[in-house]
Image: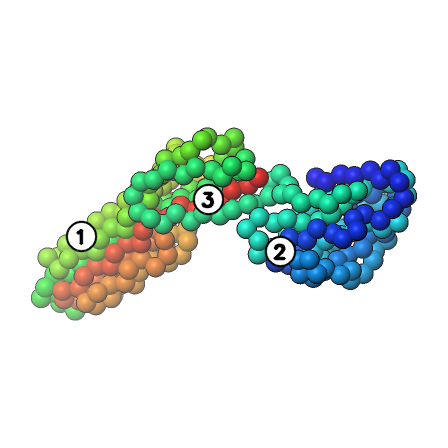
Amino acid sequence: MLTTTFTTAANYPAVPQIGPNAEFVRIDLIITGPVIVELWSGAHGQATPIGEVPFQQSASISACVAIRVKDATAGTHVSCTVIAWQTKDPLPTYIGVGASQVSTVPTGALIGVQAITALGAGTYTPSATATAIVVEVVGAGGGGGGTAVGASAATAAAGGAAGGYGRSYITPLAASYAYSVGTGGSGGNTAPGNGTAGGNTTFGPITANGGSLGGGAASGVQAEGSGGQSCAGATLNLQGGDGQGGANSRGGEGGASFFGGGGRGAVTQAGQGRAKGSGGGGGTGPAAQGGNGADGLIIIYEYA
């Protein structure tokens, strides 16, 4: 919230503060006296006015990068809330309202996004200006089953299941958080072999379980699918999609995760899990390797 009361009649500011690469800002105004609001557009340091709108009470404006209050009488009070913006800047800086330029990030603004894909354990430290985070976690997908050497064309292994998904809003923040990103399960071999389960993904108290393995298939067998796994410790905990059983001489599809679909069942080499956390496909026919499950993922959204 940016608030100013004008003590003298004037135009403020002389030139609005506009962040580099800003594309637009939507602003809500609450005004207690008659005033004209001038809309500005253009690149950083080269902004020009594009129109004027008279306001006497409350109003919203959009599709501009800054505002300039004109013809404010003494005692006019302007309360300005930035409610949305689009910018290519890492940290949005915008608008001048009142007797001096204002360049700030309002409380609650999104200030950064991190996607953690590196497998294994690590430590996340919040940015110095962050006061809250939203974190998303997904467990790794299970590997699909393989089929035996010399198996009939009707043989079909099962797809691996997807990992669980969790989402939490966290505030106040700790100094740091331990995490671990799970590894996707391996596809089954041609022994025939089952796939392996996906690894868990964790962040602080949140554990998104890895997806269950897909079963391998001997000659003529159509393996049953496995259940998707859950998440615990988050505000929102969702179960991953089931691995599909082999059917109609076709290996089962890998289970879909929150982020998208799993690998296809196929001959020779089944498909890998496509979206993060999804399961690998099951093999079809003789000597078909199961598809690997997709790795887990952590996404962190930081807010001022």
* Callout 1 amino acid: Asn
Q: Position of residue 27 (x, y in %)?
A: 72, 49
Give whichever of 114, 276 is nearer the camera.
114
Q: Amino acid at mark 2?
A: Pro
Q: Residue at x 70, y 39 (%)?
A: 1
Residue 90 seen from this side: yes
Marks 1, 3: nearer the viewer: 3
Q: Quadrant of residue 219?
A: bottom left
Secondary-structure class at tag 3: strand
Q: Secondary structure at mark 2?
A: loop
Whether residue 156 is visible here, answered yes or no, is: no
Q: Position of residue 139 (x, y in %)?
A: 34, 45
Q: What's the mark number on residue 299?
A: none
Q: Earlier in the sequence, mark 3 or mark 2?
A: 2
Depth order, front residue of 85/224: 85
Residue to which mark 2 is pinned: 20
Give the residue displayed 49% in from the left and 35% down from the top.
Answer: 170
Q: CA distance from mark 3 to mark 2?
A: 25 Å
| Residue under numbered circle 1 | 194
User: Given contact means CB atoms under 8 Å apart, are the residues at marks 1 and 2 in contact?
Assistant: no
- Cα separation, mark 1 vs mark 2, equals 54 Å
Percent x, y for residue 21? Answer: 61, 58
Q: In the picture shown, does residue 194 fall above or below 265?
A: above
* Residue depth check, mark 1 versus mark 2: number of the one nearer the observer: 2
Task: Determine the secondary structure under disc 1.
Answer: loop
Q: Give the labeled residue for mark 3.
A: 300
